[in-house]
Amino acid sequence: MVDTLSSRQASPAARGLVARIFGVLTSPRATYADVAAHPRWFGVLLVVLATTIASSSWLLSTSVGQRAMIDQQLQTSEAFGRTITDEQYQQLQRFAPYSAYVAAASQIVVLPLMSLLIAGIAFAIFNGALGADATFRQVFAVVAFSGVLMALKALFSTPLNYARESLSSPTTLTAVLPFFEDNTFVARLLGTIDLFLIWWIVSLAIGLGVLYKRRTAPIATGFLLVYGAIALTIAAVRSVLAGA
Protein backbone atom coordinates (compact mmCIF):
# COMPACT_ATOMS: atom_id res chain seq x y z
CA MET A 1 0.00 0.00 0.00
CA VAL A 2 2.82 2.39 0.89
CA ASP A 3 4.67 1.47 -2.30
CA THR A 4 1.56 2.18 -4.37
CA LEU A 5 1.08 5.59 -2.80
CA SER A 6 4.73 6.53 -3.20
CA SER A 7 4.75 5.51 -6.88
CA ARG A 8 1.69 7.67 -7.51
CA GLN A 9 3.36 10.60 -5.84
CA ALA A 10 6.55 10.06 -7.84
CA SER A 11 4.67 10.07 -11.15
CA PRO A 12 3.23 13.55 -11.86
CA ALA A 13 -0.21 13.88 -13.39
CA ALA A 14 -0.38 14.25 -17.15
CA ARG A 15 -0.77 17.72 -18.60
CA GLY A 16 -4.03 18.65 -20.24
CA LEU A 17 -4.41 18.65 -24.02
CA VAL A 18 -4.27 22.44 -24.38
CA ALA A 19 -1.17 22.66 -22.17
CA ARG A 20 0.51 19.97 -24.25
CA ILE A 21 -0.33 21.69 -27.54
CA PHE A 22 1.16 24.99 -26.41
CA GLY A 23 4.01 23.11 -24.72
CA VAL A 24 5.12 21.63 -28.06
CA LEU A 25 5.77 25.21 -29.17
CA THR A 26 7.14 26.72 -25.96
CA SER A 27 8.78 23.88 -24.00
CA PRO A 28 9.02 20.87 -26.31
CA ARG A 29 11.43 18.78 -24.24
CA ALA A 30 9.31 18.83 -21.09
CA THR A 31 6.13 18.37 -23.11
CA TYR A 32 7.42 15.36 -25.01
CA ALA A 33 8.59 13.84 -21.72
CA ASP A 34 4.99 14.15 -20.51
CA VAL A 35 3.71 12.66 -23.77
CA ALA A 36 6.11 9.72 -23.46
CA ALA A 37 4.98 9.09 -19.90
CA HIS A 38 1.29 9.42 -20.77
CA PRO A 39 0.99 8.60 -24.51
CA ARG A 40 -2.50 9.87 -25.29
CA TRP A 41 -2.73 10.90 -28.95
CA PHE A 42 -6.37 10.89 -30.05
CA GLY A 43 -7.21 14.41 -28.90
CA VAL A 44 -4.26 16.11 -30.57
CA LEU A 45 -4.85 14.17 -33.79
CA LEU A 46 -8.41 15.52 -33.88
CA VAL A 47 -7.18 19.07 -33.23
CA VAL A 48 -4.58 18.86 -36.00
CA LEU A 49 -7.11 17.40 -38.43
CA ALA A 50 -9.79 19.96 -37.56
CA THR A 51 -7.35 22.87 -37.91
CA THR A 52 -5.88 21.82 -41.24
CA ILE A 53 -9.24 20.84 -42.71
CA ALA A 54 -10.94 24.06 -41.57
CA SER A 55 -8.12 26.18 -42.97
CA SER A 56 -8.00 24.55 -46.40
CA SER A 57 -11.80 24.22 -46.67
CA TRP A 58 -12.33 27.89 -45.94
CA LEU A 59 -9.74 28.99 -48.50
CA LEU A 60 -10.97 26.63 -51.22
CA SER A 61 -14.59 27.66 -50.63
CA THR A 62 -13.74 31.21 -51.71
CA SER A 63 -13.42 32.39 -55.30
CA VAL A 64 -9.86 33.47 -54.51
CA GLY A 65 -8.92 29.99 -53.34
CA GLN A 66 -10.59 28.30 -56.30
CA ARG A 67 -8.74 30.51 -58.78
CA ALA A 68 -5.52 29.81 -56.89
CA MET A 69 -6.21 26.08 -57.13
CA ILE A 70 -6.62 26.32 -60.90
CA ASP A 71 -3.45 28.42 -61.21
CA GLN A 72 -1.54 25.88 -59.13
CA GLN A 73 -2.67 23.06 -61.41
CA LEU A 74 -1.51 25.03 -64.43
CA GLN A 75 1.85 25.86 -62.86
CA THR A 76 2.41 22.25 -61.79
CA SER A 77 1.69 21.00 -65.29
CA GLU A 78 4.02 23.56 -66.82
CA ALA A 79 6.75 22.70 -64.29
CA PHE A 80 6.62 19.09 -65.49
CA GLY A 81 6.60 20.09 -69.15
CA ARG A 82 2.91 19.46 -69.80
CA THR A 83 0.41 21.80 -71.43
CA ILE A 84 -3.21 22.05 -70.27
CA THR A 85 -5.71 21.92 -73.12
CA ASP A 86 -8.84 24.09 -73.24
CA GLU A 87 -10.96 21.06 -72.38
CA GLN A 88 -8.82 20.26 -69.35
CA TYR A 89 -8.98 23.88 -68.24
CA GLN A 90 -12.78 23.80 -68.39
CA GLN A 91 -12.75 20.60 -66.32
CA LEU A 92 -10.63 22.36 -63.69
CA GLN A 93 -13.15 25.20 -63.58
CA ARG A 94 -16.04 22.75 -63.12
CA PHE A 95 -14.14 20.90 -60.38
CA ALA A 96 -13.12 24.06 -58.46
CA PRO A 97 -16.34 24.43 -56.38
CA TYR A 98 -15.87 20.87 -55.07
CA SER A 99 -12.17 21.18 -54.28
CA ALA A 100 -12.80 22.02 -50.61
CA TYR A 101 -14.66 18.74 -50.10
CA VAL A 102 -12.01 16.71 -51.90
CA ALA A 103 -9.25 18.37 -49.90
CA ALA A 104 -11.05 17.67 -46.61
CA ALA A 105 -11.65 14.02 -47.50
CA SER A 106 -8.05 13.52 -48.57
CA GLN A 107 -6.72 15.10 -45.37
CA ILE A 108 -8.90 12.84 -43.22
CA VAL A 109 -7.22 9.86 -44.88
CA VAL A 110 -3.71 11.14 -45.59
CA LEU A 111 -2.80 12.86 -42.30
CA PRO A 112 -3.42 9.84 -40.01
CA LEU A 113 -1.79 7.51 -42.53
CA MET A 114 1.29 9.72 -42.74
CA SER A 115 1.50 9.82 -38.94
CA LEU A 116 1.28 6.03 -38.84
CA LEU A 117 3.94 5.72 -41.54
CA ILE A 118 6.36 8.10 -39.81
CA ALA A 119 5.78 6.42 -36.45
CA GLY A 120 6.31 3.01 -38.03
CA ILE A 121 9.60 4.06 -39.62
CA ALA A 122 10.84 5.62 -36.37
CA PHE A 123 9.77 2.56 -34.39
CA ALA A 124 11.53 0.23 -36.83
CA ILE A 125 14.75 2.27 -36.74
CA PHE A 126 15.02 2.81 -33.00
CA ASN A 127 13.41 -0.36 -31.65
CA GLY A 128 14.40 -2.70 -34.45
CA ALA A 129 17.74 -1.55 -35.82
CA LEU A 130 19.11 0.18 -32.71
CA GLY A 131 17.59 -2.11 -30.09
CA ALA A 132 15.90 0.66 -28.10
CA ASP A 133 12.85 0.09 -25.92
CA ALA A 134 9.62 2.04 -26.42
CA THR A 135 6.07 1.10 -27.30
CA PHE A 136 4.54 1.95 -30.65
CA ARG A 137 1.86 3.90 -28.80
CA GLN A 138 4.53 6.16 -27.30
CA VAL A 139 6.17 6.72 -30.69
CA PHE A 140 2.83 7.46 -32.36
CA ALA A 141 1.89 9.91 -29.59
CA VAL A 142 5.17 11.80 -30.12
CA VAL A 143 4.53 11.93 -33.88
CA ALA A 144 0.93 13.05 -33.34
CA PHE A 145 1.97 15.91 -31.08
CA SER A 146 4.67 17.01 -33.52
CA GLY A 147 1.77 17.53 -35.93
CA VAL A 148 0.90 20.66 -33.93
CA LEU A 149 3.54 22.38 -36.10
CA MET A 150 1.61 21.42 -39.24
CA ALA A 151 -1.59 22.82 -37.75
CA LEU A 152 0.24 26.04 -36.93
CA LYS A 153 1.56 26.16 -40.49
CA ALA A 154 -2.02 25.92 -41.79
CA LEU A 155 -3.16 28.77 -39.54
CA PHE A 156 -0.17 30.89 -40.54
CA SER A 157 -0.28 30.19 -44.28
CA THR A 158 -4.02 30.38 -45.01
CA PRO A 159 -4.53 34.15 -44.59
CA LEU A 160 -1.25 34.81 -46.41
CA ASN A 161 -2.31 32.55 -49.29
CA TYR A 162 -5.64 34.36 -49.48
CA ALA A 163 -3.87 37.71 -49.66
CA ARG A 164 -1.35 36.36 -52.19
CA GLU A 165 -4.11 34.55 -54.16
CA SER A 166 -1.90 31.49 -54.24
CA LEU A 167 -1.80 27.97 -52.76
CA SER A 168 1.99 27.76 -52.87
CA SER A 169 3.56 27.71 -49.43
CA PRO A 170 4.57 31.19 -48.21
CA THR A 171 7.19 29.63 -45.93
CA THR A 172 9.46 27.97 -48.50
CA LEU A 173 12.93 29.35 -49.08
CA THR A 174 11.78 30.54 -52.51
CA ALA A 175 9.11 32.70 -50.89
CA VAL A 176 11.55 34.00 -48.29
CA LEU A 177 14.45 34.46 -50.75
CA PRO A 178 12.86 35.35 -54.12
CA PHE A 179 16.18 36.01 -55.87
CA PHE A 180 16.18 33.25 -58.51
CA GLU A 181 14.31 32.74 -61.76
CA ASP A 182 11.36 30.34 -61.39
CA ASN A 183 12.60 27.88 -64.01
CA THR A 184 16.08 27.39 -62.53
CA PHE A 185 17.22 24.35 -60.57
CA VAL A 186 18.06 26.49 -57.54
CA ALA A 187 14.56 27.98 -57.46
CA ARG A 188 12.99 24.53 -57.71
CA LEU A 189 15.24 23.26 -54.91
CA LEU A 190 14.48 26.19 -52.61
CA GLY A 191 10.79 25.79 -53.39
CA THR A 192 10.81 22.29 -51.89
CA ILE A 193 12.43 23.38 -48.62
CA ASP A 194 9.86 24.69 -46.15
CA LEU A 195 10.81 26.44 -42.91
CA PHE A 196 7.83 24.97 -41.06
CA LEU A 197 8.84 21.48 -42.16
CA ILE A 198 12.33 22.11 -40.81
CA TRP A 199 10.78 23.25 -37.51
CA TRP A 200 8.61 20.11 -37.48
CA ILE A 201 11.63 17.88 -38.14
CA VAL A 202 13.55 19.45 -35.24
CA SER A 203 10.51 19.16 -32.96
CA LEU A 204 10.04 15.49 -33.88
CA ALA A 205 13.74 14.88 -33.27
CA ILE A 206 13.40 16.41 -29.81
CA GLY A 207 10.42 14.17 -29.07
CA LEU A 208 12.16 11.00 -30.21
CA GLY A 209 15.32 12.02 -28.37
CA VAL A 210 13.37 12.44 -25.15
CA LEU A 211 11.49 9.18 -25.66
CA TYR A 212 14.59 7.11 -26.45
CA LYS A 213 16.92 9.07 -24.14
CA ARG A 214 19.24 10.05 -26.98
CA ARG A 215 20.81 13.32 -28.09
CA THR A 216 18.61 15.47 -30.30
CA ALA A 217 21.34 16.76 -32.64
CA PRO A 218 22.23 13.44 -34.37
CA ILE A 219 18.55 12.57 -34.84
CA ALA A 220 17.70 16.00 -36.27
CA THR A 221 20.79 15.93 -38.51
CA GLY A 222 19.82 12.54 -39.92
CA PHE A 223 16.25 13.64 -40.59
CA LEU A 224 17.37 16.90 -42.21
CA LEU A 225 19.81 15.04 -44.47
CA VAL A 226 16.99 12.77 -45.64
CA TYR A 227 14.78 15.83 -46.20
CA GLY A 228 17.57 17.49 -48.18
CA ALA A 229 18.05 14.38 -50.33
CA ILE A 230 14.32 14.24 -51.07
CA ALA A 231 14.31 17.96 -51.96
CA LEU A 232 17.27 17.49 -54.30
CA THR A 233 15.58 14.53 -55.99
CA ILE A 234 12.31 16.41 -56.50
CA ALA A 235 14.11 19.46 -57.90
CA ALA A 236 16.18 17.27 -60.24
CA VAL A 237 13.15 15.36 -61.51
CA ARG A 238 11.21 18.57 -62.11
CA SER A 239 14.15 20.08 -63.97
CA VAL A 240 14.56 17.01 -66.18
CA LEU A 241 10.86 16.81 -66.98
CA ALA A 242 10.65 20.54 -67.66
CA GLY A 243 13.60 20.26 -70.01
CA ALA A 244 12.03 17.33 -71.78
Image (tube, grey):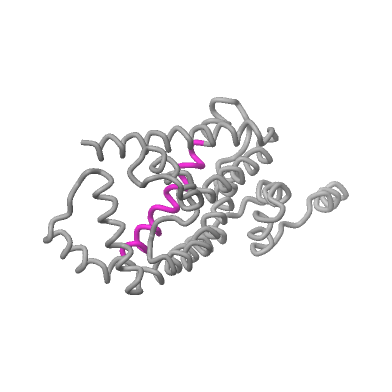
Is residue 96 rendered magenta in the image? no
Q: Which residue is most to the bottom?
A: 62
In depth, the one of 94 and 103 nearer the eye is 94
Q: Which residues are drawn in magenta?
A: 102-121
In depth, the one of 41 and 170 nearer the eye is 170
The residue shown at (42%, 49%) is 113
Q: In this view, does 3 lie above or below 151?
A: above
Of the 4 image quadrants, the one containing the C terminus is top left
Is residue 104 rendered magenta in the image? yes
Place of residue 13 in the rendered image (x, y in percent of width and height, measured from the top left) = 75, 57
Q: How many labels does the image show?
A: 0
Place of residue 70 in the rendered image (x, y in percent of width and height, measured from the top left) = 27, 62
The residue shown at (40%, 56%) is 168
| Snapshot quadrant of residue 234 | top left
| Secondary structure character of the magenta stretch overall | helix
Q: In this view, does 209 lie above or below 112?
A: above
The residue shown at (37%, 45%) is 181
Place of residue 92 in the rendered image (x, y in percent of width and height, measured from the top left) = 21, 63
Q: In this view, does 146 lie to the left or right of 228?
A: right
Q: In this view, does 30 lie to the left or right of 238?
A: right
Place of residue 126 in the rendered image (x, y in percent of width and height, measured from the top left) = 58, 31
The residue shown at (38%, 60%) is 167
